[in-house]
Image (spheres, rainbow, N blue to C red):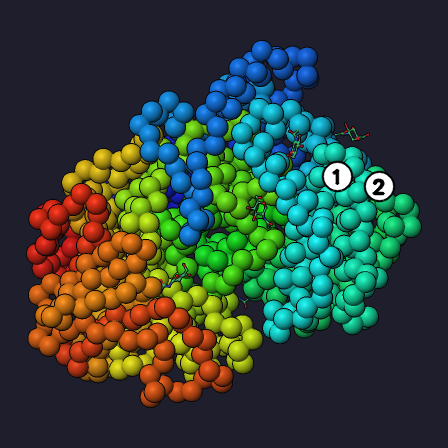
Amino acid sequence: MAANYNAVGAHASPYGSGDPYYNESSGFITPHPVKKRTNNWVKIGVPVLILVIIGAVVGGVLGSRASKNDTSSNGETGSSRGEAAASSAASIKLEVGRFATATNSAFMMPIYPSTTNTAAFTTPTFNPSVNNALAWPKDPFQPSKPDPLTPRTDRPRLIAPSYKWQALPTLIKSDPYLKGWNETIFANATNYYGQQPVRYFMDGDSGILDNAREVKMRIKAFAYVFLMTNDTKWVDRTWAELQNAAGDGPTPFGPDDDKWNSVHFLDTAEFTAAFAIAYDWLYSQWSDTQKSQIRTTMIKYGLQPGVTAFTSSAGWWRNNITGNWNCVCNGGLTLGSLAILGDDNTGIAEQLLGLTVPNAKENCARATVDDGTWAETANYWYFGSTGHAEMSSALLTATGSHYGLLDVNPNFFKTGVYHMYATGATSLFDYGDHGPNKFSSTANSLILYADQYNHPEFALFQREQHDAAEPWSMFWYNPTISGAFWDGAPLDHFFDNALDQWASMRSSWTDSNSLYVAVKAGKNQGLQTHNDLDVGDFVLDALGTRWAGELGSGDYRSPDYFSSEAQDSNRWKYYRKMTQGQNTILINRENQNVLAAPTVKHETSGTTQGSSTVLDIPQDSTAYWTADITSAYFGVSSVKRGVRLLNARKQVLIQDEIASQESVQWRMHTNATVSIDDSGTSATLSLDGQSMKVAMLSPPDGAKFSTSLAQRFESDPTPPIPDQENPGVTVLIISLPAGTYNLQVLFNPQWSGMSDGDFVTPKTVPLDSWSLTSHN
Ligand SMILES: *[C@@H]1O[C@H](CO)[C@@H](O)[C@H](O)[C@H]1NC(C)=O
Ligand SMILES: *[C@@H]1O[C@H](CO)[C@@H](O)[C@H](O)[C@H]1NC(C)=O
Ligand SMILES: *[C@@H]1O[C@H](CO)[C@@H](O)[C@H](O)[C@H]1NC(C)=O
Ligand SMILES: *[C@@H]1O[C@H](CO)[C@@H](O)[C@H](O)[C@H]1NC(C)=O
Ligand SMILES: *[C@@H]1O[C@H](CO)[C@@H](O)[C@H](O)[C@H]1NC(C)=O
């Protein structure tokens, strides 16, 4: 049966029917229970819904969950934890070591050993009964009625409470991931130590966000190393960074009345979070004067602008904004408020906590739609989910509840599934705005979500990634974890929310040379102005490289880049954002209709990977996805696109059925060198020492491949400023006049050991007749 969980409604697993954590008979209780594991010996503390009325100062009502039943940790004391059991469990873990042996230098993807010795590569599990000795101790702070205004009394209170610091050195010794991450964080902190405090740089529309992110990243590392060493040089170095970002350092730092650039509130929020961590994690080290200075700076440049944002139109991001802005802004203000709660006598921390928590529940928590897809782009997922995870974690540790932030949206947990399936063999399905590294954001929210939502595969996946090593992971990681994320993981997944409608299909989870194809339909509006006009767009990986790829973000400083999502928006005049700049059909050289509302259909053989990293794919293993994308175009009777895997997932067919009154182009952007053969109907793409043959099947009369640079047609309307160049990118094109066509383009990656005769040439089957067996 097709693993289409949407077909069976809300009572379904995020993975489809193969999900080992899903109980078919009970389904998910709404909301999806957070931390629902129970141990035999811990039966107390079943979550109860309690309403906490915040006093008049705050004026808000927060739904509150009683202290979570933290059964991943055990209630035993040191003496009963069993030294022998500990050392045996630890030695098994250490012997297995980290699965990924290296990171690919071009794409930074983990390289997994090729092994059929599957003893350790079993079902993802949190296994306190076996790994009990490796568990975090039980949190001594278990308020029976959590209240955001009643924080734990010991420090740190944000994300990493002291009982975890005490346990960490022992856990590091017994877990190879914690051990490796600890070393990397020390190395990173040492590297930042020798650098000058972050210099103020106003980067156009991006403000001083990169400054803020860098300060936050450094402070996390400095404070971490201090707490692991007690060497006060890290406190001094943190102070130098704080002083500089408060305008008291060696170089100027912004205007006196608004140093943290509150007009671009992300900057303000990230600085506030950085100061909050410094204040809280190094609390024992600051003099009263220093504490007072940190608070004053944080209030003046962070929290007070936060109140202004909530009480004026300046805070546009708090009004129905389901994306990174809401998560990051509320998150930073929450960390800042929690850090100073009790020390500050202005009331501002209390006031803000009454505003940020309900607002993030209304907005940030809805940034994941019901299929798990982030409402912006796969790239913004990093920033937004980091904000959400930091805020949830800080509320949990500081006050004993996340107040619903983790489960007010019963589908939020699927965001882990989204990220895993958006991650291709070489890189993300990087549709829409996709920019450079966002310093302080990683995919480590997955490590928190794994533990909170009882989806260990999220953490098993993320712990192999290059960005896993940072302080948050050390505390979010549940060391009782075991197994392999790929064991039982379906190779395909379809995301069906009308907003995104996309497919992810692959030939392996662990072979970086595997085939990966992702394709989308979805809407051209309602995506926080981070999307492209890209219905039908796809990416294709094989042989360790990306053959069909994305151009990413334009320059955010370009005038009108974010002006609107309307049909006549200047945003759609920039090549990277217009339909021409996508791997899809272009009609009449015109942009797609912003009101597109496609429909999709799909099926999969439901193939899952087993515990081995070496897959033997059955010959009938396949998947396909078709979309009626007519509504995305003007001047057509019909446009349909289908993508399917052939020949045990070694080949890909892209089929387009078009009836158009206007000219037609099939377009694909590639970094490969393209060589078109004499017939004009096939081409060889060469890239990174590999090759891919692309051929039209039953080519329509006159259909020939051609190529062009990735740039606008002379006839296009002029954007406010010239486009960014796309060096090295070639567009592979099929140009046709108005007419009715069935265009079939077959992609044959030249796998080693495969000869021409090993590739299949499928028969022509109309898209409406595609089925799992239609091409056998
Ligand atoms: C963490 O890493 C540092 C640097 O490599 C090392 O000196 C320290 O011993 C490690 N901590 C533990 C608990 O192993
Ligand atoms: C942290 O250190 C690791 C290992 O030395 C390095 O690969 C990585 O780039 C560093 N990260 C940052 C943000 O400096
Ligand atoms: C650092 O100091 C604290 C508090 O005195 C102590 O509990 C901890 O063990 C010390 N850590 C190290 C690595 O010396
Ligand atoms: C919030 O935005 C969504 C989609 O962007 C829209 O459908 C909805 O009507 C908006 N709600 C409010 C209260 O403005
Ligand atoms: C070209 O390669 C760069 C670097 O890997 C990548 O970011 C970009 O998406 C690629 N472009 C295309 C069209 O594949």
Residue 760 in sight:
no
Residue 756 lies, in percent from the top left, at: 11, 51
Quarter of the displayed picture in which ligand 3 can be seen: top right
Please name the residue shown 15% across and 73% down the image: 704
Query: What residue is pinned by disc 1?
Result: 226
Task: Please state which of the two labelled residues, at mark 2 or mark 1, is closer to the viewer.
Answer: 1
Q: Amino acid at mark 1?
A: Phe
Residue 746 lies, in percent from the top left, at: 17, 59
Q: In the rendered image, which quarter is residue 118 located in?
A: top left
SS assignment at label 1: helix
Q: Amino acid at mark 2?
A: Gln
Please name the residue shown 56% across and 75% down the image: 557
Q: Earlier in the sequence, mark 2 or mark 1?
A: 1
Mark identifier at residue 614: none
Mark identifier at residue 285: 2
Residue closer to the observer: 571 or 543: 543
Q: Is residue 125 above or below residue 52?
A: above
SS assignment at label 2: helix
Residue closer to the observer: 635 or 456: 456
Residue 287 lies, in percent from the top left, at: 90, 45
Q: Looking at the figure, which quarter contains the N terminus?
A: top left
CB within 8 Å, label 2 to label 1: yes
